[in-house]
Image (cartoon, helix red, strand yellow):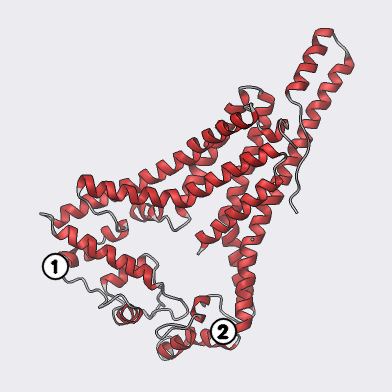
Amino acid sequence: MSFINVISALGNNNSIYPLIVRDCGIENLAKCVMTYKQNAKESKVIAKEATRERIIDEYGTSAVWLGGIPLMRFLSDKFIDFTGLSSKVDVKLFDETVNQGINSNIKKFENTASSAVSELKKVSINKNLFKNLQIGKFFITTAIPIMVMGFLLPKFNFNLTKKKMKKIEQQKTDEKLKFLGMDKFVKSINDKKQISFCGLEKLATMSELNQMMILDGGLTFGRVNTSRNKKEKREMAFKMAGMCYLNYLAPKQIDKSLNKLTKKIFGLNTSLDVKTLSDNDFINEIKNGTLLLPDGFDEKSVLDFIDNNPTSTFVSQIRKLKLVNFLENNIRDPRKFVEIEKINDFRRAVDEFASDALKSDSIEKYVKKALQAKSFNILANVLISSALLAIVLPKLQFLFRKITTGSNLEPGIVGNGDK
């Protein structure tokens, strides 16, 4: 993958790629280190167990969170294909409009995309079965990962801690029974008080990015319910609420803020993707005033333009951005629903950028600076959002713990709260 493609992927806050970098590359490691340091202030024994719990929790959750939906979707699609229906058909096509839908796409593409149309016809005939399969697919791709992340993983983690803490306490008991000396006996008593463990657990009795948001909702519910006492529940709720905000809302807000600052301070428009800014054909057509665009913003105008100009620069851009899908014969894939508003948003951004670029002394220099600024903004967004997740949120979590429990230790391990 080229540098431009990497930067583009990181800058797409509607995809999972920024989440992967923040979650696996920065956040998890930082949280594990900070967990040890925070607990070690009072007990290295607790710090060791708390860190082990955090490693299993963070990296185990990341594995299921990032891989669970793709795996379940892959298996579900294989089952749908096994039934004789095509998993590639977009269920949104059942919302029939004048310009796109199951029936209208069958009519429009019957002579140009016969194979895809054949799949549409099978789905149309078995409409209820296909809808039920899609509902089942959605349930499987969300419910199973939620069950694993929100309930099974914490239960395993807590039981492992309980087993280890019992072993430690048994060792302390054995030391006392040996009665090697009063000083060692007293030390043993003090150590036991330091690492007292409640040993109680609560056993709790649902676009890919949107599904991951649902996963996080289910994960929050599961983690709060599997917490071992009330204070751990409160801390977990605080932590998960912060994570949901910083993962899904904050990066988009940071992106908008950085774009506004870049426009205000440097006079550069950075609203377009780096893939678009690095496309020489796109830039030349803006410069020469030859960039073809849809006549209007209504569904018919946009679809007609795409179908009649499949090799145009504008269509090439929305294909790169995966806003529209084409078959190998350069015919728009009739099995896929086209999100008109997303294309219109891109169209508006192109109009705005072209207007700003053409006002500059040199469009080439303007584009070069805009590309550099956009790349910087994307990397800055990743670093800022990662720092918020990996450093600021844990610090706030520890402060919340200190205020609510009066201790630096993990409330679920030491049990210093209401059960």
What residue sits right under mark 2 in the picture?
123
Q: Position of residue 157 (x, y in %)?
A: 71, 42
Residue 324 lies left or right of residue 239; in this view the side is left
**Mark 2 neighbour class, 10 Å CA radius: few under 14, some 14 to 19, many 20 or more:** many
Looking at marks 1 and 2 on the same chain, the residue that comes earlier in the sequence is marked by 2
| Residue 323 can be seen in this image | yes
Report the residue at 46% width, 40% height from top.
388
Q: Which quadrant is the N terminus positioned in?
A: bottom left
Residue nearer the viewer, 68 or 227: 227
C-beta proximity under 8 Å, tags 1 and 2: no
The C terminus appears in which quarter of the rendering?
top right
Any mark on residue 288, and which? 1
In the rendering, at what x and y percent does residue 136 appear? 64, 71
Q: Residue at x 84, y 8 (%)?
A: 182
Identify the secondary structure beneath mark 1: helix
- How busy is the neighbourhood of tag 1: few (under 14 within 10 Å), some, or many (20 plus)? few
Q: Distance between the Cα atoms at labels 1 and 2? A: 46 Å
* Residue 213 in picture, x, y percent from top left: 54, 56
Which label was assigned to residue 4? none
Which of the 4 image quadrants contains residue 129?
A: bottom right
In-image side of 126 versus 89 (left or right) = right
Kind of element beneath mark 2: helix
Q: Amino acid at mark 2?
A: Val
Q: Is residue 319 visible?
A: no
Where does residue 200 sit, x and y in percent of width and height? 78, 38
Name which residue type carries label 1: Asn
Q: Residue at x 62, y 55 (%)?
A: 218
119 above or below 340?
Answer: below
Q: Is residue 90 left or right of residue 353?
A: right
Residue placed at 35% from the left, 79% from the top? 303
Outermost residue, left side: 361
Q: Is residue 232 above or below residue 249?
A: above
